[in-house]
């Protein structure tokens, strides 16, 4: 199944909330700009939720900006909150990149948002430059069916990412973890109602995409073993694990 996160442009990130400007006079061959950072995209998932359900959305002033001219020379860099508008731009074309967080910081509540924009200064005066940013991470969550929860009342999992980051998922964890969009695997410790302990290890799940949340569904397929059903975009993959439930 594919679900879409609702666009979160409706966060009260209007132009005035993220805009920095200066009212000083400019020369006829220079101009000033005001930057507007505007999150707004959909995320593929199996629930219709907002990204804010998984992490606190950053204030636009927390984004890092980097401005370069048409020769790719850096004109300015710093946080949106540090932009005073005192810099005037000679007539020409420029690019600006906005960034918050890093995909290498993996875990709960660690979104990375990125985006770029361009603008042209054609004459003196001021203009708004809007930068649309989107989620650069993949998200991973774990869900257990009722049958699985009943068979294994005690259970815990660990998501291991391509960077070898280990993210614990205790049985009560319902959040999605933000990871680098590369690959991951899941290991687990399970205990049956009768007190028998087992472990499981999935294969690596690869081909991850940014702005996509993958749900690993744990289910007891039959009395001879456990089948892990993995929702991967439109695909459901069943993996037979070496766990002997009747020992």
Image (cartoon, helix red, strand yellow):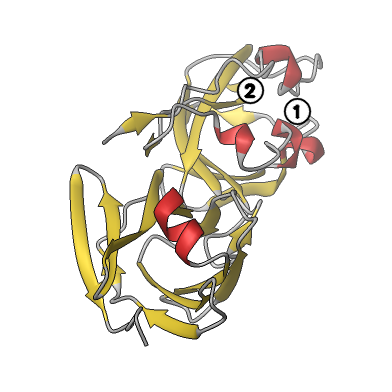
Quadrant in which the N terminus appears: top left
- Mark 1 vs mark 2: which is more N-terminal? 2
Q: Residue 12: x percent and y percent?
A: 69, 15
Q: Residue 170: x percent and y percent?
A: 63, 65
Q: Residue 176: x percent and y percent?
A: 54, 51
Q: What residue is shown with label 1?
A: 85
**In the displayed structure, does residue 64 sit left or right of residue 38?**
right
Name above or below for residue 81 compared with residue 17: below
Label of residue 93 in the image: none
Residue 140 visible somewhere in the drawing: no
Q: Could you tell me which secondary element the residue under label 2 belongs to?
A: strand
Q: Residue at x 65, y 56 (%)?
A: 172
Q: Residue 93: x percent and y percent?
A: 43, 32
Residue 238 visible somewhere in the drawing: yes
Q: CA distance from mark 1 to mark 2?
A: 7 Å
Name above or below for residue 114 compared with residue 131: below
Quadrant in which the C terminus appears: bottom left
Q: Are marks 1 and 2 in contact (CB under 8 Å)?
A: yes
Q: What residue is shown with label 2?
A: 33
Q: Residue furthest bottom?
A: 247
Q: As rendered, which of 2 and 196 lies closer to the eye?
A: 196
**In the displayed structure, does residue 86 sit left or right of residue 177?**
right
């Amino acid at each position: 199944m594919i679900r879409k996160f609702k666009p979160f442009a409706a966060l009260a990130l209007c132009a005035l909330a993220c805009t920095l400007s200066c009212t000083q006079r400019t020369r006829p061959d220079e101009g000033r700009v005001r930057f507007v950072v505007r999150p707004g995209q959909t995320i593929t998932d199996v629930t219709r939720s907002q990204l804010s359900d998984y992490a606190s959305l950053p204030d636009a002033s927390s984004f890092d900006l980097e401005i370069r001219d048409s020769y790719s020379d850096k004109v300015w860099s710093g946080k949106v909150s540090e932009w005073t508008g005192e810099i005037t731009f000679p007539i020409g074309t420029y690019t600006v990149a906005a960034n918050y967080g890093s995909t290498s910081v993996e875990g709960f509540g660690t979104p990375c948002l990125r985006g770029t924009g361009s603008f042209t200064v054609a004459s003196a005066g001021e203009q708004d430059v809007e930068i649309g940013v989107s989620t650069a991470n993949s998200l991973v969550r774990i869900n257990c069916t009722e049958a699985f929860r009943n068979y294994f009342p005690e259970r815990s999992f660990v998501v291991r990412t391509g960077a070898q980051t280990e993210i614990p998922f205790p049985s009560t964890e319902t959040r999605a973890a933000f990871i680098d969009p590369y690959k991951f695997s899941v290991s687990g410790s399970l205990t049956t109602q009768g007190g028998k302990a087992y472990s499981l290890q999935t294969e690596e799940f690869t081909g991850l995409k940014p702005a996509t949340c993958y749900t690993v569904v744990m289910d007891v397929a039959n009395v001879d073993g456990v089948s892990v059903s993995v929702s991967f975009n439109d695909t459901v993959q069943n993996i037979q694990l070496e766990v002997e439930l009747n020992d």
